[in-house]
Amino acid sequence: MSDVACSSGTFLKALPTLTEYPHDLLSGRHGIVAEEKQGGHRMTDLMIVVGARPQFIKTAPVVKEISSRKINLTVVHSGQHYDPEMSAIFFRELHIPKPSVNLQSGSGSHAKQTATIMRRLEATILAHSPKIVVVAGDTNTTLAAAITAAKLNVPVAHIEAGLRSHDLSMPEEINRRLTDHCSVLLFAPTKTAMRNLRNEGLQRMAYLTGDTMVDSLRMVMPVLRSREADLLKRFKLKPRDYVLVTLHRPSNVDDSDRLREIHNALKHVAKRLRVLFLVHPRTRGRLARIKGLAHSADREFTLAPPQGYIENLALMNNASCLLTDSGGMQKESFILHVPCLTLRANTEWPETLQSGANRLINRPRMIPRETLRVALNDDLRTRITSLKNPFGDGRASKRITRLLESSLQRLK
Ligand code: UD1
């Protein structure tokens, strides 16, 4: 356990005991959502709250591990992502049990979305009395669930704690900082994340577990290999013959001038290399508002809907390079040894920047030159293939489950 629990001596002290919770907060006297009223009060050991695409991926191996033990688990879906290609497909592909509760929060401004999740989740927590609430990542769902549980004095455990981009203009940076500070169990994926937590005085609650996304990736690798050929055929692609693009950050897609510039840069790349752009719903909406752009795709520049987890990884695995602003895909491409260009000024995954495996390019006009430089560079491929994976050994979910289990025993 030495690689896991960096502060096991203080672990017990960090967790309040159940008897410390105000009774009326646990007995369900506050408003309960309609579906809960009918079901009455149920006790659960752990409640995992998910809601957006990356969370389904991050928690799938943890849910699997927990389900193999004698732990009572309730999965709650906030409803932040609701399109089948953003939600249901991940539950199917990753064999995650259907959530017991869907809060159906849907879209809205940050305050509205976060507040809706908080209001509805409060009732659900009161109805289920979880001993620990588990959250993952840095979305509005993560923050809403962490604050709601913490204010009900229910201990919060955060998977993927300690990441920092040091850019407070990103909603995710606000979410991850605040979530870490109201959690009592922090599961850090990397040594850098541990260092960040230490710098903020949170080391007492921090454990270096590794990254659960490595576990998820390993879980699907055999299926992925078996689907690659069909998938490439479907998109009429050849291995290493195309650039895979995904963009959804507000900083890239909410400003129509910038989005138009990015789109033009991609058209430029498509003169030399095929471009496959998997368009996130946020981006789809923004593209549609810019006249002439949404319909400008051709064979060399293909726009397609977001793909499932396995399809997305298979397309990444065969690309000559990835252009993205996603956090998770920077890491996945690193593990798969696919060169990555990140259209952002910073990254919460600095480990990916070593040896040029990932490069930050914030200016859209750099896209054509940099993409061709990276995509056609065999030396770079060879170099990054030999890099050590700093994200863990694929056993993060086992460590997290063990830590959760021992916390539950202490709470009894
Ligand atoms: C969210 C997360 C981001 C994560 C991303 C992965 C926050 C602040 N951001 O961003 O960290 O990387 O998910 O996808 O939580 N929409 C649909 N269908 C859906 C979901 C969303 O059409 O199933 C549209 C809505 O119109 C919405 C927009 O996409 O306004 C954005 O969705 P939202 O959940 O606010 O954030 P994302 O951009 O997806």
Image (tube, grey):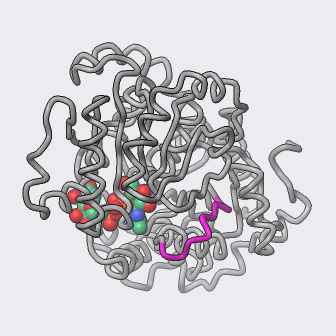
Task: Check the image and report above or below for 169 versus 389.
Answer: below
Q: Nearer the viewer, residue 301 or 143?
A: 301
Q: Nearer the viewer, residue 267 or 160?
A: 267
Q: Residue at x 44, y 54 (%)?
A: 343
Magenta-colored stretch includes residue 377: no
Give the position of the C terminus as an image quadrant: bottom right
Lateral position of residue 186 relative to residue 78, left or right: right
Give the position of the N terminus as an image quadrant: top right
Q: Nearer the viewer, residue 184 or 278?
A: 278
Lateral position of residue 296 relative to residue 178, left or right: left
Q: Position of residue 275 (x, y in %)?
A: 29, 34
Residue 282 shows up from this direction: no
Task: Check the image and report above or below for 137 versus 320.
Answer: below
Q: Position of residue 145 (x, y in %)?
A: 49, 70
Lateral position of residue 54 relative to residue 207, left or right: left
Q: Nearer the viewer, residue 289 or 404?
A: 289
* Residue 44 in which image quadrant: bottom right
Lateral position of residue 71 relative to residue 38, left or right: right
Q: Position of residue 146 (x, y in %)?
A: 54, 71
Task: Check the image and report above or below for 370 versus 55.
Answer: above
Q: Residue at x 14, y 40 (%)?
A: 297
- The residues colored magenta run 161-169
Q: Residue at x 25, y 67 (%)?
A: 257
Q: Residue at x 20, y 40 (%)?
A: 303
